[in-house]
Amino acid sequence: MGFGPLELFIILAIVLVLFGAKKLRNIGGDLGGAIKNFKSAMNEEEKASDDKSTTENQVQLDKDGGTTIEGKVESKTNEKV
C-alpha cells in the first residue's frame, strides 16, 4: 500500500503551490550545501583519526626506548657513571 506515481505527483504539486518554486530551489541548494559540508567534516574526522593513530604508535615506540620524538637515542636503563 505505497504511493504510486500519481499520488507523488499530486503531493509535489501541492508542495509547489504552498512554497513556490523559488523557495523550493533555495531549500534544495541549502540541503545540498549541508550534505557537502557534512561529507567534508567526515573526511576531516577520518584524517584526524588516522593522524592520531600514527602519533599514538610513535608514542608507544618511544615508551619502549630507542629514538625519542626529538630524535635522540636513549637507553632503556638509567646507568650511573
Image (cartoon, rainbow, N blue to C red):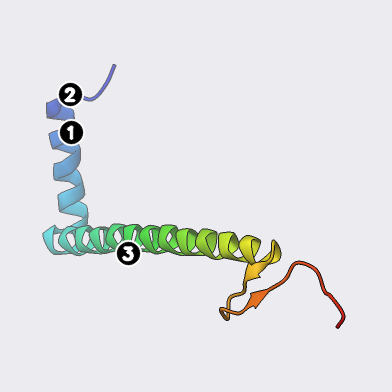
Q: Earlier in the sequence, mark 3 or mark 1?
A: 1
- Under circle 2, the secondary element is loop
How packed is label 1: few (under 14 Cα within 10 Å), some, or many (20 or more)?
Answer: few
Q: Are marks 1 and 2 in contact (CB under 8 Å)?
A: yes
- Look at mark 2 in the image and give the residue it sits on: 4
Q: Tell me what residue is drawn at x 23 percent, y 25 percent.
A: 3
- Look at mark 1 in the image and give the residue it sits on: 8
- Tell me where residue 75 sits by quadrant: bottom right
Work out which residue is located at the far top of the displayed protein and give it: 1
Q: Quadrant of the N terminus?
A: top left
Q: What is the CA distance from the residue labelled 1 to the residue labelled 2?
A: 6 Å
Image coordinates for residue 46, horizontal then vertical, percent: 43, 57
Position of residue 40 relative to residue 3, above or below, is below
What label sits on residue 37 in the rendered view? 3
Q: Would you say 35 lies left or right of 53 here? A: left
Q: Looking at the image, how many numbered discs can be counted on the residues? A: 3
Image coordinates for residue 37, horizontal then vertical, percent: 32, 64
Q: Would you say 56 lies left or right of 12 here? A: right
- Tell me where residue 64 sits by quadrant: bottom right
What residue type is disc 1 on? Leu
